[in-house]
C-alpha cells in the first residue's frame, strides 16, 4: 500500500515508517496537517496514519478537512489516528472527525497491523477498533 504518515515527532516518524517499510509498504512522511492535505492533493495514497497533536493544523482538523473535500471529490481514504488519547471517551470525537480507527502510542507492529487488517478486511465491524493502551496518557 501507499501510506501517508502525518506526524510531527521525528522519532515517531521513523518508528512508524520502519514498521510499514518492513512489511513492504511505500511510505511518505509529512510533519503537519497542511502538508498532509497538499500531499493528498498531489499524490495517490491507500491509507493515512494521522498523529493527533501536530503544529499548524492538528489531526482532527486535518481529517475533517479531508472528509469535507471528499464530500465533493468522492472517495474515502482510510485514516487511522495515531494518538496518545487512547481512551474510550475519545472514540466519539475521533469518529465524528472522520477517523476509521486508531492506535495508541507507542505504536507497536502488532497494534498497527491489527488496525490495518481489521478495516481492510471485508468483514470488519463498523465499530471503531480500540487497540490502544491507556498506560501512556502523555504525548510529545
Ligand atoms: Mn505529535
Image (spheres, rainbow, N blue to C red):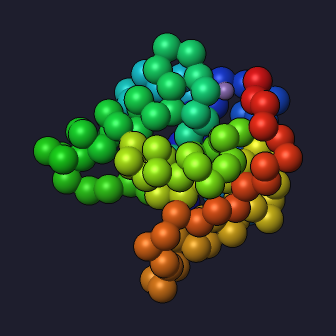
Q: Going by the image, does 139 lie left or right of 46? A: right
Q: Position of residue 128 (x, y in %)?
A: 52, 64
User: Which quadrant: the C terminus?
Assistant: top right
Residue occupying the far front of the picture: 89
Task: Reply above or below: 137 against 56.
Answer: below
Residue occupying the far top of the picture: 56
**Nearer to me, 52 or 135:** 135
Whether residue 21 appears in this view of the structure is no
Residue occupying the far bottom of the picture: 123
> In this figure, what is the number of numbered marks?
0
Residue drawn at (76%, 44%), measured in percent from left and top?
A: 105
Residue drawn at (83%, 41%), measured in percent from left and top?
A: 136
User: Which quadrant: the N terminus?
Assistant: bottom right
Ligand 1 located in image quadrant: top right
Whether residue 83 appears in this view of the structure is yes
**Nearer to me, 111 or 137:** 137
Task: Reply above or below: 100 against 85.
Answer: below
Residue drawn at (58%, 34%), measured in percent from left and top?
A: 52
Residue occupying the far left of the picture: 72
Q: Position of residue 56 (x, y in %)?
A: 49, 14
Q: Position of residue 103 (x, y in %)?
A: 67, 53
Task: Reply above or below: 56 against 30.
Answer: above
**Nearer to me, 33 or 102:** 102
Residue drawn at (42%, 31%), measured in percent from left and top?
A: 62
Q: Position of residue 110 (x, y in %)?
A: 80, 65
**Nearer to me, 25 or 76:** 76
Amino acid at each position: 500500500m501507499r501510506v501517508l504518515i502525518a506526524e510531527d515527532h521525528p522519532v515517531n516518524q521513523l518508528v512508524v515508517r520502519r514498521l510499514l517499510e518492513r512489511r513492504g509498504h511505500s511510505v511518505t512522511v509529512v510533519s503537519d496537517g497542511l502538508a498532509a492535505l497538499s500531499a493528498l492533493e498531489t499524490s495517490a495514497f491507500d491509507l493515512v496514519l494521522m498523529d493527533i497533536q501536530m503544529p499548524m493544523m492538528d489531526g482532527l482538523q486535518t481529517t475533517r478537512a479531508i472528509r469535507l473535500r471528499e464530500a465533493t471529490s468522492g472517495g474515502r481514504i482510510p485514516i487511522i489516528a495515531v494518538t496518545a488519547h487512547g481512551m474510550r471517551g475519545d472514540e466519539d470525537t475521533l469518529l465524528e472527525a472522520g477517523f476509521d480507527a486508531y492506535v495508541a502510542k507507542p505504536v507497536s507492529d502488532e497494534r498497527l497491523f491489527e488496525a490495518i487488517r481489521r478495516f481492510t478486511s471485508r468483514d470488519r465491524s463498523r465499530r471503531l477498533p480500540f487497540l490502544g493502551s491507556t498506560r501512556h496518557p502523555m504525548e510529545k
